[in-house]
Amino acid sequence: MDATLIETEKQDALFSYKGFKAYQPLNTYWAEKGLILHTEFRDGNVPAGHEQLRVFTHALSLLPPGVKTVRLRSDTAGYQHDLMAYCDRGENERFGRIEFAIGADVTPEFKKAVREAEEWHPLFDRKGRIAGQWAEVCFVPNKSATKKGEPYRYIAIRERLKQPLLPGMDYLPFQTIAFSETQYKLFGIVTNMDWEGGKLIDWHHERCGKSEEAHAVMKEDLAGGKLPSGKFGENAAWWWIMVLAHNLNAAMKRLVLQGSWVTKRMKAVRFHLINLPGRVMEHARGLIVRLAGNHPSFDVLVSARRRIMELGYAASG
């Protein structure tokens, strides 16, 4: 689950927390299928964490019958105790207990607990280089307990700052912490999962790549960020139509094009498949588009049409 800001100059738009006018839809992204499971178009001044439990439960009801297990990952906007309790206590009748990994707020109390952490482990990036360190933190805020009454796991991540803060600025509410005169940028994750810390952090970080890429596709590739009206309702309709187009495009790539096409952006699909030069001919009361036989996309188009026919037969059967 993640919200995104759509900057706009519409007269009736409201100011976001970043200081510019915007709308801020909240999206629930189905990572395995590349689909937007649910979206809620909101004004720019609505906090990203507003009523996330209601949105999440509605999104769960939209999943098809074949889905048996759900895990949730979110940034700090999802750090809502009612949402975490709902997941951990198994209050959903269909899915039961839902595992989660959610960004935790870096509060002064959390920083105090981090300073008492004794064992720090190296955190590696995808190239095997050390990107930071992580540690289990003994931190128990109010209302933070699992179904069994045990506190959730809190994991701290520290990344060394390349440019240290100026002296005397430690009192400012920056997301930083100092150890033995070395300054770090500090992050937190709360979870009810028992995965090894490095594996859990990597899985949680995958959220950034997937959801941010989906937001870029929606706002740029499919023009969701080019709102057509000054009225909220019309802009919401435009956004929902764009989400339908996004999901149809994702289904087309996964079910019909397949292979390396699944990860391609809309620009590549337009260049290689949609905007192809061809000759339109009339024959036997039908239209025929003739392409060059040696065109690199010819085989892709033929196999795609074959799969579309197969899907049609499967649906009719």
Image: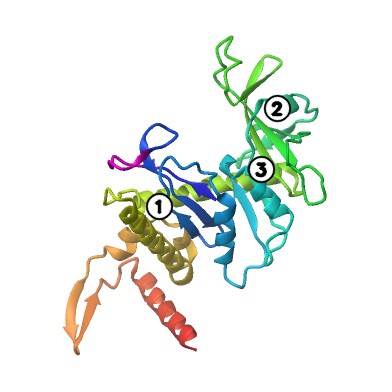
Per the image, the residue denoted by label 3 is 201
Is 206 placed left or right of 299 in the picture? Answer: right
Is 158 placed left or right of 255 in the picture? Answer: right
Q: Residues within 10 Å of mark 2 (few under 14, many from 20)?
A: few
Q: Is residue 282 above or below residue 232?
A: below
Going from the N terminus, do you reach mark 2 or mark 1 first? Answer: 2
Per the image, the residue denoted by label 1 is 217
Q: Residues within 10 Å of mark 1 (few under 14, many from 20)?
A: some
Q: Position of residue 61 (x, y in %)?
A: 58, 66
Is 219 placed left or right of 107 in the picture? Answer: left
Q: Position of residue 298 (x, y in %)?
A: 33, 71
Q: Amino acid at mark 1?
A: Val
Q: Main secondary structure of the magenta part?
A: loop
Residue 277 position by quadrant: bottom left
Q: Residues within 10 Å of mark 3 (few under 14, many from 20)?
A: some
Q: Magenta span has 11?
A: yes
Q: Amino acid at mark 2?
A: Glu
Residue extent of the magenta highlight: 6-14
Q: Is residue 202 at least partly visible in the picture?
A: no
Q: How is the image coloured?
A: rainbow
Q: Is residue 18 at least partly visible in the picture?
A: yes
Q: Is residue 291 above or below residue 76?
A: below
Question: SS class of the residue under badge 1?
Answer: helix
Is 259 placed left or right of 19 in the picture? Answer: right
As measured in the structure, the alpha-carbon distance from the residue carrying label 1 to the one carrying label 3 is 25 Å
